[in-house]
Structures are given as structure tokens and as C-alpha cells.
Amino acid sequence: MLDSGPIEQAKSNVDRSADPVIELRAVEKHYMMGDFLVKALKGIDLKILPGDYISILGPSGCGKSTMLNILGCLDQPTVGEYLLDGLDVAQLTDDDLSAVRGNKLGFIFQSYNLIQQLSVVENIEVPLYYQGVHEDESREIAIELANKVGLGKRLDHKPTELSGGQQQRVAIARALSNDPSVILADEATGNLDSKSGGDILQIFDDLNAEGKTLIMITHDEGMAKRTPRVIRLKDGEIGYDTYIHG
């Protein structure tokens, strides 16, 4: 049975009267597959508040990946508006979208996406390099984050010298390096055993307890029960959206 402590703490971070950090207004995403028009998302209306801890849940083909790409500014809506921290990002250029991703979003992927030739601390520094942070400040931030995720004694290790759980910890630290408004985790425990996966979820609980907004994309019902808010997608639409704990 999961500890309800982190769940209750996560719930307490959300002021439901606050302005949303993310707002989708009648968002649709269409694709052409041969001669057929596919509507991957259909009229999505959604508000995500500062401090929210959310699972976006559903089976393959329900629209989760498309939703992730929209929320992560990796793709743009065909129809509708997307506001991130009040900024309408739906019509931004690719360069502007890249800047928004670098400044406001942190990504954690199932496959870690680490650079194999770089050490732990160097992987964490990568986003800071692209933001032009001075190397001394960058190294200080990276070391602090490595310690935060329990890798302070493995700063010089390469990804091949780390377990899957340790690699995901590096990915989490890297996602935190730009102090993002929102952290997006895509099946973040999918490649991990239950012990390592549980450790990663505990880090997510702790980050949310510190006030971070987390969105987990998952097909795992058990994982979804851990978060205070669950959004279930079905055939490109929101089946339900509720705070299941409180």
C-alpha cells in the first residue's frame, strides 16, 4: 500500500484559485495518414495549476503522446490556444518554442536520453550550457542537483557505469537545472524494476512537496493512483479529470 503522506502533501500545494501555469483552450491536433484525417486530440480544455501533481492516463493510441508533445512545446495545436505561464505558445516560431522549452519546461524520458560520452555532472550541465550560464555557476548548480538526487559521489561516472535508476536520477537532475515551471515525465519508470521505480516516484513526491508542478504521462493505473489528480484520455478526449485524493 502506498504511503498517503506524499499524496496529502502534494494536494496541499495546490491553490485552486491560482492562475493556471498551463491552459489549453479547445485544442485539437490533426494528422493526415494517407487520405485519412486523424484527430489525435479533440477539443481539449484543460487548466493545470501551480503545484499540481498529475497523471495523464490511458492506453496506447488515446492521445497521451500527442498531449505530451503539445504541453512540451514539441508540437503545436492544429486548432485552439495553449497558454504557458500566460504566454500563448500555440503560434510561436520553432526558435521561440525552443526558447520556451529551455526556460520553462523540464523533460524526463523513459529512455533517459543521456549523452554517453559525458559524465553525470556534465550531463546535468547541458541545458545550462545552451542557456549561456557561466561554467563556474553551471558546475555549482549541477553538483548541487546531483547531490539532491543522491548522486553526489558519482559525479565523474559515465552513464554506462550507472544502473537504470541512477541514470534516471541524472535525467531528473538535468530536468531541474533550468528551474522549470513544469516538469513533464514520459513513462519515467517504464524501464526500471519496482524498487528503482519506487525510488524515482519518491523523488517526484519530494519535488512536488517543494512546490514543483509535475505531469506524468503513463499507462500504469497503479502509478496514477499515486498522484492527487488524474486525467484519463480516451480517443483523443478527456474522459475524466479529477482530484482523486481530496
Image (spheres, grey):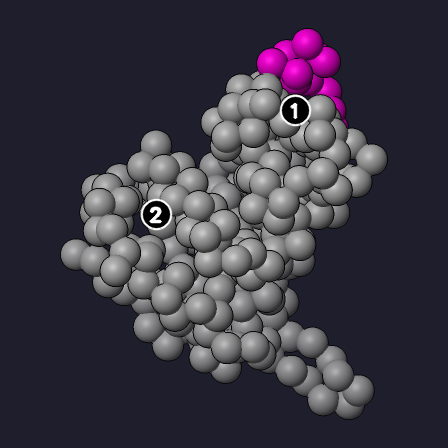
Residue 171 in view here: no
Up the image or down, 40 lies above or below 84; here it is below
| Magenta region | 128-140
Q: Is residue 193 magenta?
A: no
At 56% from the left and 33% from the top, the residue drawn is 173
Up the image or down, 163 lies above or below 74; here it is above
Secondary structure beneath dot 1 equals loop
Residue 167: x percent and y percent?
A: 63, 42
Q: Which residue is labeled 2 in the image?
A: 52
Mark 2 and mark 1: Cα distance apart in space:
31 Å
Of badges 2 and 1, nearer the viewer stands 1
Residue with the most extreme left position = 246
Q: Is residue 136 magenta?
A: yes
Residue 151 in view here: yes
Q: Main secondary structure of the magenta part?
A: helix
At 71% from the left and 30% from the top, the residue drawn is 157
Disc 1 marks which amino acid? Leu
Image quarter of the C terminus: bottom left
At 77% from the left and 90% from the top, the residue drawn is 35
Disc 2 marks which amino acid? Asp
| Residue situated in front as seen by the camera: 61 or 190 | 190
